[in-house]
Amino acid sequence: MGCTGCITNELADWLKSSFRNSFNQKKLREKRIAMCVKLRKDQKNEHIMKRRTITLSSLSDKEALSEDSPFKEQVRSGRYFLHVPRRYRQGCEQRQKLLSERDSSINEIINAGLLSCFVAFLSMDDEPTLQFEAVWVLTNITSGTSWHTKRVMDHGAVPAFISLLSSPMLHISEQAVWAVSNIAGDGPMYRDVLIACNAIPALLACISPDTPLDFLHNLAWTLSNLCRSKNPYLPGSVVQQMLPSLIMFLHLSDKNILSQVCWAFCYLSDGENNRIEVVLRTGIIPRLMELLNHEDTYVMVVIDAGCLEVLPKLLRHSKSSVQKEAAWALSNIAAGPSKQIQQLINCGLFAPLVELLRSGYFKSQREAVWVVKNITIRGTMDQMIFVIRIGALEAIIRLLQVPDAKVVMVILDTINNLAAEKSGETEGVCRLIKELGGFAHIEMLQNHENVVLRKAASYLLDKYSLGFFSASKLELYLNYVHLFIAKFLAVRAQATLS
């Protein structure tokens, strides 16, 4: 018998009024996705602004940026550099200052035919200052449109950037990481060019115990950008290369690194089950659950955007081990504050959870029962009503017949929490429990071999009788009487025939 069909009119009206306009799934989902996109976009803009406003130039802003600067005229006429390294450096520094303030300067450099000059400077190892200024200029150009990025790549900058990743000058190496990250974030075609040029091993080689925290943040951001694009997805062999470093990043405490690596795992788990399984096999789910309580809101939102989107698929996975891990992850989220429980509801996780309770593997059902119990402990009244409304109560009542005493005890605790006075509708909930056959099952548990279970069953029946226990006991006795009469009549009929 379904949950909706057996609810009395009183309880049905109560449920209807409690849920009116409370759970508009589509609007909530759209709002959450929009917020995640905005946060991601804001952070990207913040990165670009930081990259464009830092300067090591020895020239004054006034000299580099004034409208009558002779440098600007040199750019327009194509007469940019003299054949003296000092002049090269000075020109690079001025260009870098202009790019820090004006996007239109990108087009000025390209139109003046200067990209080949800057790319050539990348290989001048005996002029590290010139190298640094050149890679900085090119980094800012790659932060423009995809067309700007392509122009830089067409001039052969990618192999030079990758070579600079191993520069002994840390600031040059880090700036090269920025350039590579900009290219990686521009789409799968550009990402695949980087992979073909062996950018992944070069990036991973930059990670060491001595790498400064800010540098690690840039590396995490770059790996996240490499994971972002799909159509096609990142090749599996490349994912395997990157996973150890991503897992290491996930266990650091820096919030900027954590947010980037959580985005990376979000991208990696987007798609078919085989992609999800790759992430699952890393064993990172417990760490992701820990991070849901992170003090930084952005980290929480990232996990919400990625982790909770994946879990519905995992709850319906064909492998019992995957189902179990997904249900366990949900139970940890449900053990948190009510706002986390609300995210489970908003993400549509209860429909597959109830399916799991009804027909999943037993080990998965065992974990799913804990999800419902945790919600009855930490959830609001409306959230507990939602649990009843969607069919979770009916599903756990059916599980009262399983042979696992611990699971049955958890279910009895859950029923007690739902029927408790704090729900505000003890009588209505008890009536529903009776109609679902709950009290009849609990009555039978008074004969269970486990002493603790017998006492718990008796306690529930005494506490929530309200006429329902009496009714169920009367029904039970009537069944015994009917059975006795049937047997008596059968024996008598047989005796008469003989």
Image (cartoon, helix red, strand yellow):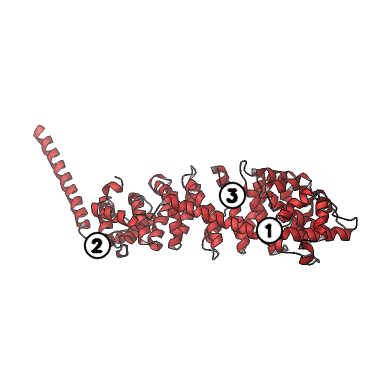
Residue bearing the label numbered 3: 267
Residue bearing the label numbered 2: 462
Residue occupying image coordinates x 68% and y 64%: 213
* Visible residue check, residue 166: no
Q: Earlier in the sequence, mark 3 or mark 1?
A: 1
The alpha-carbon separation of the residues under discs 3 and 1 comes to: 18 Å
In which quadrant will I find the N terminus?
top left
Secondary structure under badge 2? Answer: helix
Query: How far from the left and from the top, in percent, is residue 381?
Result: 35, 61
Please state which of the two labelled residues, at mark 2 or mark 1, is closer to the viewer. Answer: 1
| Observer-nearest of 90 and 183 | 90
Mark 2 surroundings: few (<14), some (14-19) or many (≥20) residues within 10 A = few
Kind of residue sitting beneath label 2: Asp
The alpha-carbon separation of the residues under discs 2 and 1 comes to: 63 Å
**Residue 218: mark:** 1
* Visible residue check, residue 87: yes
Q: Is residue 468 left or right of residue 110?
A: left
Q: Residue furthest right?
A: 83
Residue occupying image coordinates x 14% and y 38%: 490
Kind of residue sitting beneath label 3: Tyr
Q: Are marks 3 and 2 in contact (CB under 8 Å)?
A: no
Q: Is residue 133 left or right of residue 353?
A: right
Kind of residue sitting beneath label 1: Asn
Secondary structure under badge 1? Answer: helix
